[in-house]
Amino acid sequence: MDLFLLGIDGLPRWMWQRFADSGVMPHSQQLLRSGTLVPMKSSLPEVSSAAWASIITGLNPGGHNVFGFTDLMDGSYSLGFTSSRTFRAKPFWAQPDAGPSLIINVPQTYPAQPLNGMLVSGFVALDLKRAVYPAEQLSSLENLNYAVDADMTVLQQGKPQFVQELRRVMNARCEALHQHWDRQSWQQIMFVFTGTDRLNHYLWEDFEDPTSPLHQTFLDYYHEVDRHIGRILERLDDRTLLAAVSDHGFARQRRSINVNCLLAEAGYLRLKSSTRPSWSDMLPETRAFAMDPGRIYLHRQGRYPGGSVQADEAESLMQELERYLLGLQVEGCPVVSQVLRGAEIYSGPFAHRAPDLVALPATDVALSGRMNLQELIEPTLINGRHTHEESTFFVRGTQHGVIPADMRVEDVLQVLQPQVSTLQKAA
Amino acid sequence: MTAATITQCSSTAASITEVLLGGDLILNLTAQSLAAGNQARFLQLTAADHSDSRLQICSQVASVAWSETLIPLFDQLRQLDADRIVVVADQNSPAGLQAIQELSSRGIRCLLCTLMEDCGANAFMDEEDAEAVAERLRQLGYL
């Protein structure tokens, strides 16, 4: 095998190093000593769908066309949920020279698309039948009680039960990995742990508070992840290039702020009366609106059926919005730390579909782009949020491409591929 | 018009107005009808035979088939009343880049806009899955 790419969703670089050093993740300690671990910048916005799409295509969202989990269909206000069909760039396993690939639980790959090898889709997979390619492998997964996702309703029973559910799903996924790994010779394998992201979202407060009764539960889950990492390491020979990545970092979330509420309060967003407001309720007077998590779009003429912002008004409106967003405070605390221009951060054939502005949240804040204007501060059980900084990039050994000083998710393939090509030639 | 750096962007036939500014002239090298708005001005050929033709401004949607015989006609464009020429070309077609290089070499301010396919319903989750996906995303705070 040439490449094993391990994904650990939402694992911050600093946390992995800390858990490795403190003995929570002993196999990782051994692993991290064998290569280079660096912080990596997530996609903009720092959302899993866009970030994983960048990792597997080597492009920013302007190149692969996935800007978030949701988007408006072109020329309309219809909300669409991005899927594997939204990709307009090929993942590395679909490149013409790619050999047999085993791809398990990579987010944003549902429904499963044909490839040379086997793929089981990750989040937001709904139905295992449509998440598996080729279809004849479905029964083997069913026999393992493979679940496309954890049952989030278990949270209502309590956090310990929820963590148990995450464990159940992770164990079945790992069994599937090893069973199919054994089945044939693979040129590349990519496997992603996603329970880590769910754990971080709901138990971050317990991680940060050593007196919490669930603090140890949090650490134990990572210990379990590490046990699975150890089992993978045992099977890999030195010839295989091993890399590990996460899609974003994590930090404490104390409040989730609805950006559309803020835009409506300031008069930028106007909706007609509706019991269940959506983007299709936007009035032509709307100047700007948001989508998750901090994507801000001008209501441009031409781009939207009722759009009213003309191209030569855009610059002054963006400047006005930047000033407004950066000056905002809720409960005495800043909401936005940085506002970036879409035209400056995206490149590629789909950059015209990009948001005009991307707002990054201030400390302790998560931004939301819900079109529900009832609650500025949204009630939620979530207490951990994604960060743009400090996602993880690790590569074993020294035979790899140059790691950029400012490593980003779209650089991953560029760092790994020179070595993969060398291995392929040697074989 | 004065020389400037070549810039490129992409859009769709339906949403081209989002890149147009007042004072633009559109050189549409695609066969597509562009929804460019009432104020838009296009370049069109006065005759199908390039050797006996010139480029002129019209207010209706127009397109021009690319041919190297068009290149000498670009010399006239500096005299036209326009801030910028927006060259609209199909994706993967070399015509747009060639046109923009020729315009640029003449010191004419220009923008290359590549037309992409619309990203419509078929690029997203099936409609029957939408509610279930929405629920998953709500659980993680995205919706």
Image: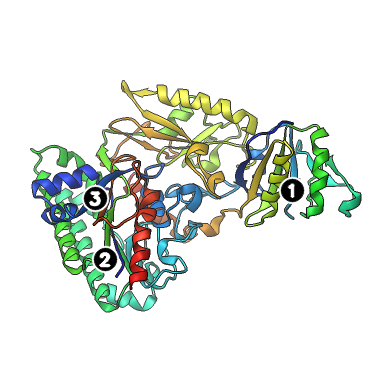
Q: Amino acid at mark 2?
A: Thr
Residue depicted at x 46% and y 23%? A324
Same chain for labels 1 and 2? Say yes or no: no
Q: Residues within 10 Å of mark 3 (few under 14, many from 20)?
A: some
Q: Amino acid at mark 1?
A: Asn
SS class, disc 1? strand
Residue depicted at x 22% and y 49%? A199
First in residue order: circle 2 vs circle 3: 3
Q: In the rendered image, which residue does mark 3 sit on?
A: A36
> Which-is-in-front pick, marks 3 and 1?
3
Instruction: Measure the alpha-carbon separation of dots 2 and 3.
Output: 16 Å
Residue A249 location in percent, x, y?
Answer: 28, 43
SS class, disc 3? strand
SS class, disc 2? loop
Q: In the rendered image, which residue does mark 1 sit on?
A: B28
Residue A51 location in percent, x, y?
Answer: 38, 49
- In the rendered image of this protein, does residue A135 appear above or below residue A224? below
The one nearer the camera, A221 or A247, is A247
- In the rendered image of this protein, does residue A263 appear above or below residue A158? above
The C terminus of chain A lies in quadrant: bottom left
Instruction: Measure the alpha-carbon separation of dots 1 and 2.
Output: 51 Å
Residue A400 location in percent, x, y?
Answer: 31, 56
Residue A21 location in percent, x, y?
Answer: 11, 46
Host chain of mark 3: A
Q: In the rendered image, which residue does mark 2 sit on?
A: A240
Q: Residues within 10 Å of mark 1 (few under 14, many from 20)?
A: many
Q: Amino acid at mark 3?
A: Thr
Tag of residue A188? none
Residue A102 visible in the current orientation: no
Host chain of mark 2: A
Q: Are marks 1 and 2 in contact (CB under 8 Å)?
A: no
